[in-house]
Amino acid sequence: MSKRDFLTLLDCTPEELKHLIQRSAALKTLHTNGEVYQPFPGRTAAMILQLSSTRTRVAFEAGMNQLGGHAIFLGTSDTQLGRGESTQDMARVLSEMVDIVMIRTLDQDDLEDFAKAASIPVINAMTSRYHPCQLLADVQTFVELRGPIEGKKVAFVGDGYNMCASYINAARQWGFNLRIAAPPGYEPDAQLLASTNHAALVETPREAVENADLVVTDVWSSIGHEGQEEQRRATFASYQVNEDLLAYAKTDTLFTHCLPAHRGEEVNATVLDDPRSATWIAASNRLHSQKALVEFLLTCET
Ligand code: CP
């Protein structure tokens, strides 16, 4: 039996992604009702985090504990990766010791090299190219609050970086229509954009947001953009999501931000707490959707 990885949303079929969302909602109900569900006693997850994380780390660690297993945090300075051990060698060794690995690293190629060398499931916990775990929580949140996302209008306003790229893959997989407003020079990868007719670039944030069912943004300077903050603040100044911009969306629109947020930059001081903001629900859904993903990867037969 071969293992399954989750390196991008394209590693699952649309049907599997729908199953993950439904399963996450079911696990959320169990958790909310205080019911114990521990299918993985004695199973271990390794969390290789070469970049900072709050939500992703805590969701995996708490989630693995709640599922009856255990999670080990491996920061760069805690492992021999930080001293030059090859990704492939580490993948071979960890495959003999733990049951599943999640990795946050800048380079998607490093993640893919690790996954190729590992005989256990590998999860992308964010790279500079993609953040697929966040999309599971975001889509779950939309479905929870508004029903099916297929055919809906989604606006992404801001940097065409890893969150935008994952929204392009999500539009393709869930069948929603994505409009992206990004400053010139900060558009998403052209080849990725051309991979689906469910995503398109538009000229202005207003054009992206008009009649949108969901509005999404992310920070202007992500991990990997250190030293560019001042220049990016100037370039992205007209791309802030605030109540004036949301007024162009549908009256029952939702807004979400993957967090951490920089109030006064990509969002103003108040929009995260606006009644249309689903940001905090999406953040809490990271726990349930990552539990559903771990369960899927540890039990699916290929
Ligand atoms: N949204 C997200 O991935 O949060 P962290 O960077 O805190 O994990």
Image (tube, rainbow, N blue to C red):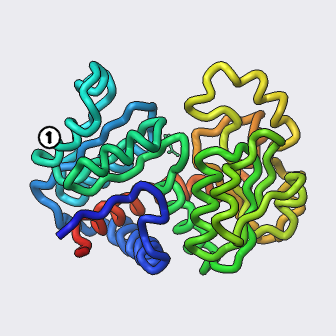
Instruction: Answer above or below: position of 294 versus 242.
Output: below
Mark 1 Cα within 10 Å, few/some/many (few <14, many 20+)?
few
Res 26 → quadrant:
bottom left
Residue 227 at what x, y percent from top left? 65, 19
Residue under the point 41% across and 76% down: 16
In this picture, residue 70 sits left or right of residue 17: left
In this picture, residue 70 sits left or right of residue 135: left
From where the camera sits, is residue 275 visible? no
Amino acid at circle 1: Val
Instruction: Answer above or below: position of 243 versus 173.
Output: above
Q: Mark 1 points at which residue?
A: 93
In this picture, residue 105 sits left or right of residue 181: left
Identify the element where label 1 is drawn.
helix
User: Residue farthest to the front?
Assistant: 191
Residue 297 at what x, y percent from top left? 28, 64
Residue under the point 83% across and 42% down: 184
From where the camera sits, is residue 189 visible? yes
Instruction: Answer above or below: position of 125 versus 8.
Output: above
- In the rendered image, the quadrant that contains the C terminus is bottom left
Count how many numbered circles sit on residues in the image: 1
Residue 254 at what x, y percent from top left? 71, 64
Residue 214 at what x, y percent from top left? 71, 65
